[in-house]
Image: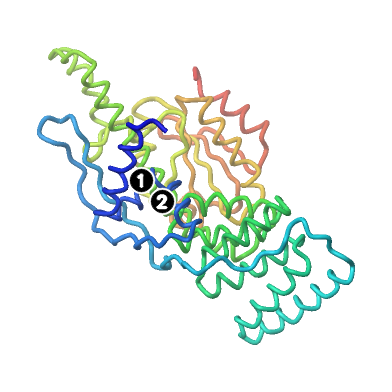
C-alpha cells in the first residue's frame, strides 16, 4: 500500500480512538459493518438533540446537523468467540440427516419451553451433523436474536444464505440483527428482500421502525450532497445583477423555511411524505412551477406495491420534471383519509392544484402511459 495512504489511515484510526462516535457516520456504515463482523465492540451512538444547519462566516464550509434516530432497541455488539460451524465440505449420510432432524425437533421443543441455551446446544449438534442445511443455521440465528447476540446471528444468517441464496429466513434474521446493531440501511435492504420472498407480520413490524431510520439517513446524505453541489455552483457562477435577482422572484415565492425548490422538488427522485403539511407544500411548489405531481399510495404489506415500486422509482429518473410522491398509508393515515384511499397501490395525477387522472392497481403499462400523457416534455 502507498505510504501516503497508510499515513492517512493511521490518522483516521487516531481520530476514531479520540471520537468513537465517528463510526456512526452514515458514510462509514460499510466500515462499521466490517468491524462488527470481526466481533469488534463499538460504543453505541449517543442520542443527540437536533441542531440547526448553518455555515461558517465565509459561507464555504457546511456544518452537518445531527440525525435524530430511534435507537431504542439497539444493543451493544456481542463479542463472544464465533460459534461452532459445520464443515461445508463434509459428506453427510442419510443417518446424519435423520439424527440432525431429531436434534432440531428437540431444539424446537426446548425453545417452546423457553430453554434457549439448551435449544442452542441442540441446534449446534444438528448443524455439525448436517452442515449443508440452510434452515438449521437460520433457526439457530433466530435463537441468537432472542439472546440479543446479533453478531452471532449474522454469522449464521450469512452461512444460511451461502447455502441457499433464496432463504427468506436468512435475510429476515440478518435484517433484524443489523437493526439491533443500528445498521439501518443494511437492515432495510435485507428486510425488503425477505418480504419479497416470503412476507410475514414480523417483517412488517420491523420495517415500520427500520424504514423511517434508513430514510432519514438517506435524506440526510442527499441533503448535504445537494448543499455542497449548490455551494460549488454558487462559487462557479458570477454574482447576479439586480435584474437577474428580480427574475428569481417567482421561484423564491415557493421557498419554505429557507429551503429552495431544488430541495422541495428534487429532480429524478421519489419524495417520501409523512404529513399533510409536507404534502401540501410539495403540491403547492409543483403547481407554482407548472409541474405534474403524482401521488403514489402504498403499504409495506402490499404485494402489488412491491411489484410496482421499482418501476415507479425508475420512471422518476426518466420523467425528471414530474414530481413523484410516495405516501405509506400506515404512516400517514390522515393523508390516506383525505384522499379516500380504499386500496393500494393507487396513483393520483395532480396538475395546477387539480386532480386530472388516477390509476388503481399495479398496472405498469397504464401508469407509464398516463405519465407520458400528462407530463409534457421530460
- Colouring mode (rainbow / by chain / secondary structure / one colour): rainbow
Mark 1 crowdedness (10 Å alpha carbons): few <14, some 14-19, many ≥20: few
Q: Position of residue 73 (x, y in %)?
A: 43, 68
Residue 12, picture quadrant: top left
Q: Does the residue at mark 2 contact the one at mark 1 (Cβ under 8 Å)?
A: yes
For the point 41% across and 34% down, which residue is it?
353
Tag 1, which secondary structure?
helix
Mark 2 crowdedness (10 Å alpha carbons): few <14, some 14-19, many ≥20: some
Report the quarter where the N terminus lies. Answer: top left
User: Mark 1 sits on what residue?
Assistant: 278
Marker count (numbered)? 2
Q: Residue furthest right?
A: 94
Q: Is residue 62 left or right of residue 224?
A: left
User: Mark 2 sits on what residue?
Assistant: 274
Mark 2–mark 1 Cα distance, whole angstroms, equals 7 Å
Tag 2, which secondary structure?
loop
Q: Position of residue 351 (x, y in %)?
A: 45, 30
Q: Residue furthest bottom?
A: 113
For the point 62% across and 85% down, which residue is it?
115
Q: Is residue 129 left or right of residue 314?
A: right
**In the figure, 248 relative to 350: above or below?**
above
Q: Position of residue 56 (x, y in %)?
A: 13, 36
For the point 51% across and 31% down, which residue is it?
316
Q: Is residue 125 left or right of residue 300?
A: right
For the point 14% across and 12% down, which residue is it?
241
Residue 363, picture quadrant: top right
Q: Position of residue 149 (x, y in %)?
A: 51, 69
Residue 84 versus residue 262: which sits nearer the camera? 84
Q: Which mark is residue 367?
A: none
Q: Residue furthest left?
A: 57
Residue 315 versus residue 246: which sits nearer the camera? 315
**In the figure, 39 relative to 223: above or below?**
below
Amino acid at each position: 500500500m502507498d505510504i501516503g495512504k497508510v499515513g492517512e489511515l493511521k490518522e483516521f484510526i487516531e481520530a476514531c480512538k479520540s471520537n468513537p462516535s465517528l463510526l456512526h457516520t452514515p458514510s462509514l456504515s460499510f466500515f462499521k459493518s466490517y468491524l462488527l463482523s470481526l466481533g469488534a465492540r463499538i460504543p453505541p451512538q449517543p442520542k443527540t438533540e437536533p441542531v440547526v444547519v448553518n455555515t461558517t462566516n465565509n459561507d464555504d464550509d457546511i456544518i452537518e446537523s445531527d440525525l435524530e434516530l430511534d435507537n431504542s432497541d439497539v444493543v451493544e455488539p456481542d463479542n463472544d468467540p464465533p460459534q461452532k460451524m459445520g464443515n461445508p465440505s463434509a459428506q453427510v449420510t442419510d443417518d446424519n440427516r435423520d439424527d440432525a432432524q431429531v436434534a432440531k425437533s428437540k431444539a424446537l421443543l426446548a425453545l417452546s419451553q423457553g430453554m434457549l441455551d439448551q435449544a442452542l446446544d441442540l441446534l449446534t449438534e444438528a448443524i455439525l451433523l448436517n452442515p449443508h442445511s440452510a434452515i438449521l443455521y437460520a433457526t439457530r440465528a433466530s435463537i441468537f436474536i432472542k439472546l440479543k447476540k446479533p453478531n452471532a446471528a449474522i454469522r449464521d444468517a450469512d452461512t444460511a444464505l451461502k447455502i441457499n441464496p433464496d432463504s427468506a429466513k436468512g435475510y429476515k434474521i440478518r435484517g433484524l440483527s443489523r437493526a439491533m446493531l443500528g445498521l439501518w440501511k443494511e437492515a432495510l435492504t435485507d428486510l425488503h428482500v425477505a418480504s419479497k420472498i416470503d412476507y410475514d407480520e414480523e417483517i412488517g413490524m420491523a420495517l415500520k421502525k427500520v424504514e423511517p431510520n434508513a430514510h432519514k439517513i438517506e435524506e440526510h446524505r442527499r441533503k448535504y450532497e445537494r448543499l455542497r453541489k449548490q455551494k460549488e455552483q454558487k462559487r462557479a457562477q458570477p454574482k447576479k445583477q439586480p435584474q437577474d435577482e428580480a427574475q428569481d422572484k417567482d421561484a423564491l415565492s415557493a421557498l419554505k423555511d429557507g429551503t429552495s425548490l431544488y430541495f422541495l422538488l428534487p429532480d429524478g427522485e421519489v419524495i417520501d411524505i409523512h404529513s399533510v403539511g409536507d404534502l401540501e407544500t410539495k403540491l403547492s411548489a409543483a403547481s407554482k412551477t407548472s409541474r405534474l405531481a403524482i401521488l403514489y399510495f402504498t403499504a409495506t404489506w402490499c404485494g402489488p406495491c412491491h411489484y410496482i415500486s421499482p418501476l415507479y422509482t425508475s420512471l422518476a429518473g426518466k420523467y425528471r420534471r414530474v414530481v413523484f410522491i410516495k405516501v405509506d398509508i400506515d404512516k400517514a393515515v390522515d393523508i390516506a383519509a383525505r384522499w379516500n384511499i380504499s386500496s393500494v397501490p393507487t396513483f393520483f395525477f395532480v396538475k395546477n392544484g387539480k386532480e386530472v387522472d388516477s390509476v388503481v392497481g399495479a398496472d405498469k403499462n397504464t401508469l407509464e402511459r398516463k405519465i407520458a400523457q400528462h407530463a409534457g416534455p421530460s
